[in-house]
Image (tube, helix red, strand yellow):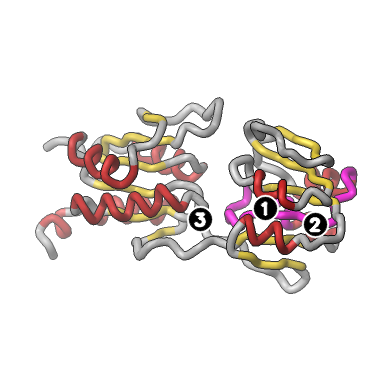
């Protein structure tokens, strides 16, 4: 009997961990797909491909041509487009799909959060009074803040923001997590930050800035996740592995 073919849409720590765990099992043949937006991606434990598929139709064709048996969406919680395309492609092909999504951060009683639906909404939430702002949203949507040039920005990203923003006060910081709370607190104090703009990505790797903001009494404008399509979702790699085994179990094959 041949190995079960699994396509993992990745780019997250959880995707890499899941791929590594599946690689240790002899009955799965996994391919990890990366968006190709990071200039120097980390080494991966299974074969990889990089770049888009050409929308939902292209993904559906790829799934059929390559004879995949399962599609796992383990992309970033804010990678809405590929998640949407994955749901459509799974429906078109009849190939099972589930999502691996780390749980979102939860507001604590002493947090000072303003929750918004989008990065554009976060710009408006900053208001008109000049503030010192820490942008921790990555590079792709930083351009929205050109419409609020009165603020001073510290912009942190894995890869450079190109082109740089057309605003008078911006400092760029290239860094890759994880970021510990103590270091984040020092960064915020050193740069006299007054408000943080962040995406509710969940997980521990970038939570340090949220804990530091709480300790320092700083405001956080939190871009919340939009509800994904009606796709079965698990929150941990362990649960993902259990679901993979269940989907390929003899009982499932017999339709029990």
The answer to whether any part of residue 168 appears in the image is yes
Kindly identify which residue carries mark 1.
207
For the C terminus, the image quarter is bottom left
Q: Which residues are magenta?
A: 190-210
Crowding near the residue tagged with mark 1, few <14, some 14–19, many ≥20 C-alpha atoms within 10 Å: some
Instruction: Answer with mark 1 or mark 2, whichever residue precedes in sequence.
Output: 2
* SS for callout 2: strand
Kindly identify which residue carries mark 2.
195
Left or right placement of residue 67 versus residue 216 in this view: left
Instruction: Answer with mark 3 or mark 1, whichever residue precedes in sequence.
Output: 3
Which of the numbered marks, if any, corresponds to residue 85? Answer: none
Q: Residue 130 placed where, x, y %?
A: 86, 55
Front of the two marks 1 and 2: 2
From the viewer's perspective, is residue 112 above or below residue 157?
below
- Determine the residue positioned at 59% across, 64% down: 117
Q: Residue 100 placed where, x, y %?
A: 42, 53
Left or right placement of residue 215 versus residue 237 in this view: right
Q: Are the residues at dot 1 and dot 2 in contact (C-beta closer than 8 Å)?
A: no
- Determine the residue positioned at 12% across, 62% down: 255
Instruction: Answer with mark 2 or mark 3, whichever residue precedes in sequence.
Output: 3
* SS for callout 1: loop
Q: CA distance from mark 3 to mark 1?
A: 13 Å
User: Farthest residue in the bottom direction?
Assistant: 109
* SS for callout 3: loop
Crowding near the residue tagged with mark 3, few <14, some 14–19, many ≥20 C-alpha atoms within 10 Å: many
Kindly identify which residue carries mark 3.
102
Q: Are the residues at dot 2 and dot 3 in contact (C-beta closer than 8 Å)?
A: no
- Determine the residue positioned at 70% across, 34% down: 164
Q: Residue 114 placed where, x, y %?
A: 71, 67
Does 207 lie within the magenta span? yes
């Amino acid at each position: 009997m041949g190995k079960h073919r699994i396509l993992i849409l990745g780019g997250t720590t959880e995707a890499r961990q899941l791929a590594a765990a599946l690689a240790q099992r002899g009955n799965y043949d996994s391919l990890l797909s990366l968006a190709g937006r990071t200039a120097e991606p980390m080494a991966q434990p299974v074969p990889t491909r990089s770049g888009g598929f050409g929308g939902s139709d292209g993904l559906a064709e790829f799934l059929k041509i390559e004879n995949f048996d399962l599609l796992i969406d383990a992309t970033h919680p804010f990678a809405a487009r590929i998640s949407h395309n994955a749901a459509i492609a799974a429906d078109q092909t009849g190939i099972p799909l589930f999502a691996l999504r780390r749980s979102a951060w939860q507001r604590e009683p002493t947090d000072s959060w303003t929750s918004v639906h989008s990065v554009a909404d976060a710009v408006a939430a900053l208001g008109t009074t000049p503030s010192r702002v820490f942008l921790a949203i990555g590079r792709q949507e930083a351009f929205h803040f050109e419409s609020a040039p009165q603020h001073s920005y510290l912009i942190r990203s894995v890869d450079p923001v190109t082109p740089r923003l057309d605003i008078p006060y911006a400092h760029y910081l290239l860094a890759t997590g994880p970021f510990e709370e103590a270091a984040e607190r020092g960064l915020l104090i050193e740069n006299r930050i007054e408000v943080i703009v962040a995406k509710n990505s969940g997980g521990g790797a970038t939570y340090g800035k949220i804990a530091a903001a709480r300790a320092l009494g700083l405001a956080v404008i939190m871009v919340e996740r939009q509800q994904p399509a009606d796709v079965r979702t698990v929150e941990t790699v362990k649960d993902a592995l259990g679901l993979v085994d269940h989907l390929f179990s003899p009982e499932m094959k017999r339709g029990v």
